[in-house]
Amino acid sequence: MTLQELSAYVAAEFEKTYGRPPRWIAAAPGRVNLIGEHTDYNDGFVLPMAIEFYSVMAADRPVDGKNVITLRSTLEKEVATIDLSAPVQPAPPKWGNYPRGVVAGFLARGQNPGGLDVLLHSTVPLGSGLSSSAALEVCTATLIETVTGKTIDPVEKALLCQQAEHHFANVPCGIMDQFISALGREGHLLLLDCRTRATQLVPMSDPSVALLILNTNVKHELGSGEYARRRAECEQAAKIIGVASLRDATPDQLERSREKMSEVVYRRARHVIGEIERTVHAAEGIRASNWPTVGVLMYASHAALRDDYEVSCAELDVIVELAQSIGLNGGVYGCRMTGGGFGGCCVALVQADAVPAIARKIGADYKARTGIDATIFASRPAAGATIIQG
Ligand code: ADP
Ligand code: MG
């Protein structure tokens, strides 16, 4: 479904729900990170792209003229309401806190959207690591920009959405998801420096390549505890090396400090320092349409996440193995886990004309090896947040 078709669907759903057509429509995409995993909290680089899956909101003023935002999601039974005549604070239902936090952020800037009836629909799978949460936040922000007729700086917008996720959803996320959803551009990836927040669009317009997103459809509940431990290990490594963060450390420096740290801390740092380098090189490879080089970097990233950082899992490893066994001759350049790990998705760089055959083969072999159905889809680098009807 194109974004235009999706918007028409959401407009029709709005009309079914509220009995009149919407006045405004806004959309924001989910994302996949091509490379640069567990680098964000080490002040490093990430290289995400927006995917052709979106959160879309259609809206109109309420007929009763009340100063209340009513949000209905096609995916949730419970309706979320935000009374603008009282302080906006976290409140049930849980899903409503993402838009609620964004509304609060705009109110704090003196940008009041006023009462609204809103219908939300999302094609970003929820909770699969493709950032349906950032899509929802950035979509809300874009709707408010549309309604108020006043756009804000996209970096400020992304940071406002990140704050909403921190303070209203209680998720201490980094900046990547909101940045790519707000700043993505069709046919481009985004090289994001998590230290300075500087961004560079990296063109990827070669029609002969595509990205495959392969969802293992598993999520192991190791996540948050292990995440906190990795962060502590990285801080420890930086301290031993004598740098502010691992962003500042070179492979040589790490080797010189190897004796002073535990074997585990050494391996964690080796992943991060290597991954930051790989991410910068991958951006250069994409600019040069040097797909085999990008593919090699993706496999190296996966190996480091599996062996040094230890955040992969059997299902992710199976998908990467299957991709690797199809190989260049079968149209696969590279593949790696993407996101925090312990389940979720892999991303593969593939020849566009081989997409159906690769998806079929990996899907069948993954099922045979794990008993699980993977969800597999292709996406080109998509546009960031968009006003569909203003
Ligand atoms: P991810 O961002 O990887 O998809 P998260 O757990 O961060 O996973 O965010 C998922 C949550 O975002 C959902 O549980 C829900 O609360 C909220 N959400 C996202 N999209 C929608 C939607 N279309 N309707 C209702 N809630 C949504
Ligand atoms: Mg999320």
Image (cartoon, rainbow, N blue to C red):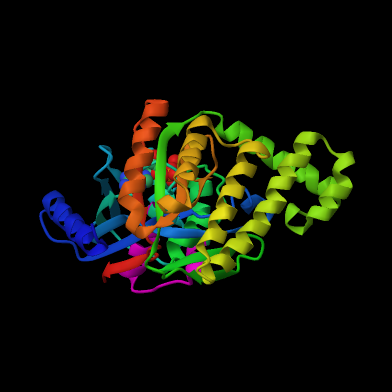
Q: Residue furthest front?
A: 329
Q: In the image, 83: left or right of 72?
A: right
Q: Which quadrant holds residue 285?
A: bottom right
Which portion, as a residue range, is magenta? 136-158
State how many labels appear.
0
Image-quadrant location for residue 205? bottom left
Let me know if residue 204 appears in the view: yes
Residue under the image location 69 percent in, 49 percent down: 272
Quarter of the image where the C terminus is located = bottom left
> How far across and how far down the image is residue 135, in percent?
39, 54
Q: Is residue 332 among what the camera can see?
A: no
Quadrant showing the N terminus: bottom left
Quadrant of the rendered image holding ligand 1 = top left
Give the residue displayed 76% in from the left and 45% down from the top. Answer: 235
- In this view, the residue in front, 294 or 237, is 294
The one nearer the camera, 360 or 311, is 360
Residue found at x 47% / y 61%:
180
Which residue does the image show at 54% across and 32% down from the upper left?
Answer: 313
Q: Is residue 128 magenta?
A: no
Q: Position of residue 275 (x, y in %)?
A: 65, 52
